[in-house]
Amino acid sequence: MASLAVARATLRHGLRYGLVGLGVALLSTTQLQWLLAERLQRDRINQLGPEVLFQLRLGELALDRLPPQTLARLSGLPLRVGAEPPTRSDRRLAHQGALLRQVLCRELTPCPTVLPAAGPRRGVWVQLLAPLEPVWLLVPIPPTNPWPPDPWLLLVGLGIGGSAGLLIFFWLEVQRPLQRLQRALTRVGGGTWPDAPLAERGTAAVRQLTGRFNAMVRRLAGAEQERGVMLAGIAHDLKSPITRLRFRLSLAGLAGADLQQAEADLAALERITSQFLLFAGGGDSEAAVTVPLDQLLAETAAELDADTLTLDLEPMERAVRPVALGRAVANLIDNARQYGATPLRLQLRATDPVGEGFRIVVWDRGPGIPEWQWQQALMPFQRLDAARGGSGHSGLGLAIAARVARAHGGDLERLEGDGAFGIGLGGRSCRI
């Protein structure tokens, strides 16, 4: 049944674009035939011009000695005497007469009058210069048949129609569906899942490719959801035991140093669980709001003194997810304090003066992350060495910051400059 449906759809598409190509072929053939007829008509008038010019000069010379009737009988020229010869309304014939008059006016002064002739013979009246009364010469102009078209023109028209039909087919059935698929892949690569499956349109191969893309997105979304549920469940289940342990420690009567160490371990566990919750998607449902971004960053870094962190913030308002962005920046600051060297510098700059672009950079004076280890550092649960596995760190800080950057249409990047190393979080207008 599926193969029969595909065959029917292919037949419908073939008939549709075949009719389009046939229509284009007829239009192009008609246009080419009209242009050819116009060209042939001009060539015929140009060839007829010298013959008519000779007859006019011969007739004008003979009229000085002979009456018009005698001249017509002796020479066989179709002459008519009178002020108004019989005429008819024929736009095509009038156009041919105007072309003939242009040819005659290049040789005769004054220009003769040319009128469409009425009668069984198709032609025009051309006025001679007669000494006594107006004399008109009938110049036959045979009709030109614009149809049927020339076989070569019909072949060219069919070629144009077939090419047009193929181009429209490839644009509507191949190029445009592939462009939609490319945009969807770009969004998925940036961490944005489509709200609905991509419509399967186009040729059979393109529809098959789109179907596989939809299946891939479903599998990835399912795996992401399962991972988020697992991490969120682990973190949630750990909260109650941590709370009970903290309560029991307060009743145990431990020595000051032991109690302080136990409190530090519990704080590390709480930090790890909060990181798990955040990485599991705790900020994905947050709506974007327009806030003073410089003030938001200043509040995020308010706990640090000026000797530890200096602020270099350009005033601006941007549409962001404030809670998620604040946590991401806090992770970058914490990462710089743990593995870098003070003083730190938090910098905010607009990347597009007329748009919504911005970049947040945390600079430190430490050794920085080597470029060859940067991609590994962005992976979840990855530590670059044993020294980076300190208390309360699970290898999620940079991964969370990278996810927040992608949610804001940007990316997380490694920077170097002025003897310092930095991690920049860029973003465009937050489109959620």
Image (cartoon, grey):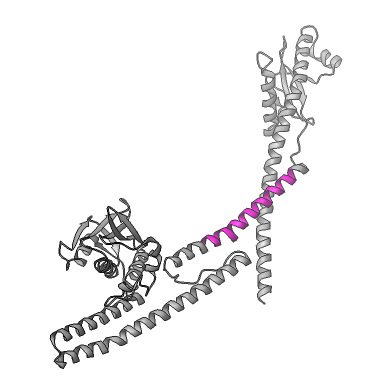
**In this view of the protein, which residue sits in the foreground, 38 or 134?**
38
Q: Is residue 222 above or below residue 249?
A: above
**Percent position of residue 353, x then y:** 30, 50
Residue at 51%, 69% in the rendered image = 198
Residue 367 shown in magenta: no
Residue at 70%, 45% in the rendered image = 29
**Percent position of residue 247, x then y:** 19, 90
Magenta-tinted stretch: 153-179
Q: Tell me which secondary structure the magenta stretch mostly adopts.
A: helix
Quarter containing the N terminus: bottom right
Snapshot quadrant of residue 170: bottom right
**In this view of the protein, which residue sits in the foreground, 47 or 21?**
21
**Percent position of residue 75, x then y:** 84, 15
Left or right of residue 65: residue 261 = left
Snapshot quadrant of residue 371: bottom left
Residue farthest along the front direction in this orientation? 386
Residue at 82%, 16% in the rendered image = 72
Q: Is residue 199 above or below residue 74?
A: below
**In this view of the protein, which residue sits in the foreground, 413 or 369?**
369
